[in-house]
Each structure stands twice: as structure tokens, then as C-alpha cells.
Image: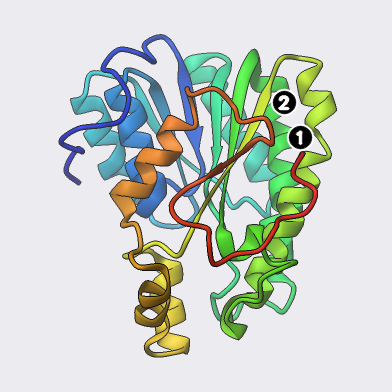
Amino acid sequence: MSNPAAGPLEPGSLTGRTALVTGSSRGIGAATALLLARAGADVVINYRAKAPRADKVVASAKELGVGAIAVQADLTDAGSVAAMFAAAEEAFGSLDLLVMNASGGMESGMGEDYAMRLNRDAQVGLLDAALPHLADGARVVFVTSHQAHFIRSTPTMPEYEAVALSKRAGEDALRERIPALEARGIELVVVSGDMIEGTITATLLERANPGAIASRREDAGRLYDVEEFASEVALAAVEPVPADRTRLVGDVSGFGEAEGVA
């Protein structure tokens, strides 16, 4: 895997900090982890099944002069999540940044309730498991889509609806944790973007509904690619948290009001 040629963060701005990025063996997660590494953060690369891909990201991060480890964990398995955080603490101590990037729900053969188990239940379980390992003043970044964030007011394509509903449910459940997080000075920020070119979700949507991504691109004017969106996620790790704790990436003029984001 190649390193990003440039990043949105100043080199060295995250030196001495540690970040764990879920689903970071490829796509947005991998690109985000490498941008954080370029800024000096030690990184924990989480993957579910593809160890060789995760190892490539680790190698790329180490080339940037930071510490990096790959840790397997299925986020729907509480035991493996606990083991992941234990491995991260053993390697680097407490965590300063948790990027909740991994999501899904369009995969075949995972059960009808998989989207909700992964995008809501597992995200809440992930945060609860992370809390003992997060440093006071740490930041948690939850990555979502406009289609999920605005699902209550703006319908999405049928093939994505179950995922959108489950991701919005996950966002809501995490927001309910804000008072407890604030008691320790931990900040939560939600990063929402449109469909992202080159992701697994976009590929699966195109497979289920040929022309869906081209249609969405036409409606939106343009869609971000993986590196562009990862830059926004990385910035969410350091920039001031908006008052509504939501970082909206790109044009949202085609979407209605999102509920319950204060």
C-alpha cells in the first residue's frame, strides 16, 4: 500500500498520541489511519478477516516513522473487541483517538439483523469497551453517511435503507452517551458524507442497482473519493468539534433536516 502524498494534518501534530481505527485494512479506514500516522500518531489497524491487507497498512505506517500494529477483531464479537483494546494498551498505553469507521450490512449471508447488530449494537459495545482505555480528553469519531444521518427526512435508495436506518440508530445510541463522555472530557464528533467513490458500499450498491452510483453522482454534482473523505475524517480528529457535534462533508442541499443532533 502506498502512503498518501500529503495530508490535511501538520506533520508531527499528533506525535505522542495513539489512534485506533476500526475497519482500517482498506478503504477509508486505511487511508485515515495513514493520514494520522503521517501526522505522527501511533496507529492500531483493526481488521475482521484479511490479515495480509492489514499488515500492508502497518508496514506503510511504520515507513512514516510511527508505531503500528494490526489487531483482528469482529466488532460483533465482544470477546475479540476486548482483546483488541487489551492489545492496543499493551503496545501503546491509553488511546487518544478512536475512529469508528467499520460498518456494513449489505453483505450476503450474514443474517437479516446483521446491519443493526453491526451498525448500532456493535458500535455501542465498541465505545463501552473502549472507555477504560481512552485517555481523559480523548476524541471519538463516528463515520456515517448523509443517507443515514438524514434518513428520517430524506428517503434513500431501497437497497441501502436497512443500512441507513441501522447507522442512524447507531449514531443516536452513541449521542446518548455524550453526557458520560463529557464527564471525562471525551469528545464525540460525527462525520457524515455522501456516497464515496471506490468503497465497498458503493460497489455493493452498484451491483444491486446498476447505475445507482452514477445517478447519485449526477444528483450531487460530484462524489468524494476515498482519499478526499479520509482527509475529512482525519481533520475531525483535531479540529474544534461543531456545536451539534456533526461534521458534514460536501453539499447537503438535497437532504432535509436531521433530527436529534444537538
Q: Is residue 109 above or below residue 226?
A: below
- x and y percent of residue 2 in the render? 16, 43
Say what secondary structure mark 2 lies in.
Answer: helix
Q: CA distance from mark 2 to mark 1?
A: 5 Å
Left-right relation of 241 to 206: right
Q: Is residue 231 above or below residue 15?
A: below
- x and y percent of residue 109 in the render? 59, 81
The answer, for residue 138, to whether it is visible in the render is yes
- Decide which of 26, 48 is in the foreground and name it: 26
- x and y percent of residue 47 in the render? 46, 49
Task: Identify the mark at residue 131; answer none if there is no mark.
Answer: 2
Give the amino acid type for the residue marked by disc 2 in the picture: Leu
Give the amino acid type for the residue marked by disc 1 in the picture: Asp
The residue shown at (38%, 75%) is: 203
Q: Which residue is mark 1?
A: 128
The residue shown at (58%, 76%) is: 160
